[in-house]
Image (spheres, rainbow, N blue to C red):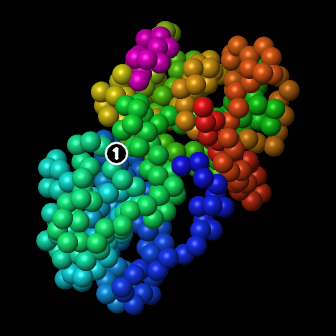
Amino acid sequence: MRASLRALFCAPRKSIRGVATLINAESAMRRANEISKLGLGKSSPNPIVGAVIVGNDGQIAGEGFHHSQDGGKHAEVVALSKAGQRARGATLFVTLEPCNHMGKTPPCTEAIIAAGVKKVVFAVSDPNPIAHGGAQSLTDAGIIVEEGLLRDEVAFTNRAWLKKIKSSHPYITLKIAASLDGKVAALDGSSKWITSEISRTDAAILRSQCDAIVTGTGTVLADNPSLTVRNIKRENFEFKPVRVILGNREIPLDSKILDKSAETIQIKGNDLGELMELAKSRAWNQILIEAGPTLTSEFLRAGLFDEVFLYQAPTLLGSGLDFASQLDIKTLNQRLDLELLSADLLGDKEKNLRLHLLAASK
C-alpha cells in the first residue's frame, strides 16, 4: 500500500487477453477504481467498490459503484444491469473480490455467473471472512479469474474500509488549517480565516468522504462551527456525517453543532477509547478530526491517526496557538515522523499549500 506513486502509475500496461480491445486492462481497472470513489462517505459499513464490464468489442458495456442508497446494490450488479446482454462473454473488472455471501443483497457471484461473464479481474482479495471465497466460486463455475491488477493503487483508494476490517478501528484523518509558522489562531484567539476559501472547499470534500467529524468543546466554544458538508455535489447524495464532540466543558444549547442538520453525539472528557468503541458500534469506515491543539495533540501523542491533511497559508502570526504543542517531545530522538505523500498548491491568486501526510510505518 505504501508503493511510490511512480511505481503505481508507471507500471507496464497489460491488455485484456482473448479480446480485441479498445481499452486495455489497466485502463479498465483504473476506471473502476476511479468510480469507486463516488461511494466515499456513502458505503459504510461496506467498502467502496467500482466495477467495469468490457464487452467483446473492447468497449465499456456497463459500469457501477456501490453506495448505501437505493437498496445498496453492489457495484457488479449495477454494472451487469447496465450491460444487459453485452455482459455475456465479457470481462468484468472490479476493485474488490466479488462477495460470496447472502447479506442485505444476494451474492454477487451468483449474478456474475447468471450473466454469462467469461472472465473476472479483481484488484484486492476480500479480507472479510464473511464475504470472501468469491474467486473460488467463480472458478468452480468455469469463469476465468485473475487477481492483483493494480492491487496497491486500489487498496490505497479503499484504505479506510480495509483498515477497519483488519483492525476493527476506523481510518482516522486529521485535518489542520494553519499559518506558515504552524499557528491555528492568533494570540487573541481569532482564526477566521487563516487559510483561503479554496482550501476550505477542499476540506469540505474530506468531510463528504467520512462517516463522522470529531471536534472538541474548545473549538465549539471558540468558533461555533456547524461541521456540516456544504456545496459538495456528487451524484445526488446528501452528506450528513455524524458530529462528535469530546470534552468536559458545557456548550450553549444554541450552538450550531447542536442543530437538526445532522446527528450530534457528545462524549464527556477526551476518552479516545470511548470514541473508538462508538466508531466500532456504528461500523464507521472513516472519521475526520477537526479540532483545536489540545485534542489534535491527543490523537498525535497516542499515535491514533492514519493520515494528516495540512492546509497552510503563506502568512506568519509569530505568536498564537500552535496546531500541536502538547506532544511531550523533549529531544530530537522523540520526534514524530510522518511520510509525505503529496504537496499541492491550491488556488490561483490566493495560493495555499496542501500537504497530504501518512502516519509513518511502524
At 55% from the left edge and 36% from the top edge, which residue is drawn?
306
Residue tagged 1 = 127
Q: Label 1 crowding class (10 Å Cα cut-off): few <14, some 14-19, many 20+?
A: some
Q: Is residue 355 visible?
A: yes
Taking 236 as reference, is 200 above or below it?
Answer: above
Magenta run includes residue 275: yes
At 18% from the left edge and 77% from the top edge, which residue is drawn?
116
Q: Give percent across and percent down for residue 134.
A: 24, 57
Q: Give percent across and percent down for residue 256.
A: 46, 29
Q: Is residue 188 visible?
A: no
Q: Nearer the viewer, residue 84 or 225?
A: 84
Q: Give percent across and percent down for residue 80.
A: 23, 72
Residue 325: quadrant of the picture:
top right
Taking 302 as reference, is 239 above or below it?
Answer: below
Q: Nearer the viewer, residue 57 or 219?
A: 57
Q: Nearer the viewer, residue 305 or 194?
A: 305
* Bounds of the magenta segment: 264-276
Residue 270 shown left or right of residue 211 in the figure? right
Taking 225 as reference, is 14 above or below it?
Answer: below
SS of the residue under disc 1? loop
At 44% from the left edge and 87% from the top edge, which residue is drawn?
22
At 47% from the left edge and 52% from the top edge, which residue is drawn?
155
Amino acid, disc 1 = Pro
Residue 326: quadrant of the picture:
top right
Taking 49 as reference, is 51 above or below it?
Answer: below
Q: Give percent across and percent down for residue 37.
A: 44, 57
Magenta run includes residue 26: no
How many marks do you count on the picture? 1
Residue 54: quadrant of the picture:
bottom left
